[in-house]
Image: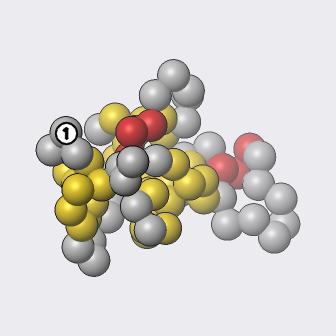
Amino acid sequence: MNPTSGHGPHHRTREDGAVYQLGDRVKVKDQEIHGEIVRWDGGKAVVQDDDAAEWMEEDDDGTLVFSLWDLVK
């Protein structure tokens, strides 16, 4: 199943109608991960983790990729 029913260059829409845009602040369900959507990887959101400095390695950019179904605003 495709997690998005509509998308444009700056937003993605879940099948339940929830719309996510670049720059939205999100939380990952059931995890203590918070951050900002910085780009798209197909239908998935690339999130800049607020706490990335705590776990990043030298060659990492501090982003994590999540399905829209894993995110809440």
Dividing the picture into quarters, in which one does residue 62 lie? bottom right
Q: How is the image coloured?
A: secondary structure
Q: Image point 49% across, 67% down: which residue?
A: 41
Tell me, yes or no, if residue 21 can be seen here: no
- Residue 69 rendering spot, x and y as whole percentages: 39, 39
- Residue 34 rendering spot, x and y as whole percentages: 48, 39
- Residue 21 rendering spot, x and y as whole percentages: 26, 60
State the residue lying farthest toward the bottom. Answer: 9
- Left-right relation of 40 to 31: left
Q: Image point 76% across, 54% down: which residue?
A: 56
User: Front-most of 57 and 72?
Assistant: 72
- Looking at the rendered image, the quarter that the C terminus falls into is top left
User: Front-most of 10 and 4?
Assistant: 4
Q: Image point 40% across, 61% down: which residue?
A: 43
Q: Image point 84% across, 66% down: which residue?
A: 58
State the residue lying farthest toward the left. Answer: 17
Above or below, 59 relative to 23: below
| Label 1 sits on residue | 16
Above or below, 31 relative to 73: above
